[in-house]
Amino acid sequence: MSDETKPKTDHGDDTAVPKPANDDNTVHVDDIVEGGFDESDDEFLEGVIAEESDDDDDEDEDAGTARITELEGQVSDLTDRLLRAAAEIENVRKRAQKDREDASKFATAKFAEDMLAVADNMSRALEAVTDEARNDSAAKSLIEGVELTMKELNGALERHGIVMVNATGERFDPNQHQSMFETETLDFEPGTVMQVLRTGYTIHGRLLRPAMVGVAKMPAEPKS
């Protein structure tokens, strides 16, 4: 066959273009396109995709865990604030309720003090009554009327929470008694109330006025 009849290559000459040597571990796109996918290629691609998917899942999981931790911290902080606010509201409510109750209980304190002055005058009047006057038929009914009025007045005071303070024979209490003098005596224990000059009263457990009293003290030892 002559040179004219030989088929020509696309390159215009007979020189073949050398192909790069294939590495056994290298997968080329041309090889895949020309030869198609076999089972090993599928497994390789699936492995690459799986690794990328696992990495994405790990990142998403870490981000989700961090977000959950952040939200839990916010919930804890808000819960603490809510509990503190609720406690403060309850304390304010209790204080307001107590103030209302105290205002209702002690609203009559000033009026009660004025009424105690009347009771003092009646008590002094009865103390001044002599045995002779009590035996007088004309004065007897008057004295009994004053005593009855005094009893009713004390009853009315008690119904409104106003109670007399026990004093005579009691241990001196500076929270309820006002010492006017001290007397040396053996008839009473030292530090006890031996005489009441003015009766004391409390209103709903709170001191309305102290009892004015005389207090016993130990007699001084005679000088040798």
Image: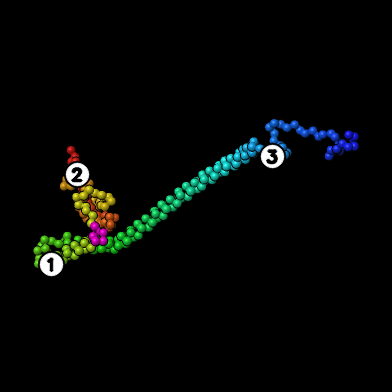
The percent coordinates of residue 127 (x first, y second) are: 17, 60
Label placed on residue 219:
2
Q: Residue drawn 25% across and 57% down?
A: 201
Q: Tell me which numbered mark, 1 or 2, is placed earlier along the sequence.
A: 1
Q: Tell me which numbered mark, 1 or 3, is placed earlier along the sequence.
A: 3
Q: What is the spatial separation of the Cα atoms under label 1 and label 2, in whole angstroms?
A: 44 Å
Q: What is the spatial separation of the Cα atoms under label 2 and label 3, in whole angstroms?
A: 128 Å
Q: Mark 1 or mark 2: which is in front?
A: 1
- Residue 153 horizontal side relative to residue 108, left or right: left
- Residue 86 horizontal side relative to residue 106, left or right: right
Is 172 covered by the magenta stretch?
Answer: no
Q: Mark 2 or mark 3: which is in front?
A: 3
**Label 1: which secondary element:** helix
Q: Which quadrant is home to the N terminus?
A: top right
Magenta-drawn segment: 158-163
The percent coordinates of residue 5 (x first, y second) are: 88, 37
Picture quarter containing residue 108? bottom left
Q: Amino acid at mark 3?
A: Gly
The percent coordinates of residue 75 (x first, y second) are: 48, 48
Q: What is the spatial separation of the Cα atoms under label 1 and label 3, in whole angstroms?
A: 136 Å
The residue that disc 3 covers is 36
**Label 2: which secondary element:** loop
As drawn, which residue projects farthest toward the bottom? 138
The number of numbered discs placed on residues in the rendered structure image is 3
The residue that disc 1 covers is 141
Q: Nearer the viewer, residue 61 or 78?
A: 61
Q: Amino acid at mark 1?
A: Ser
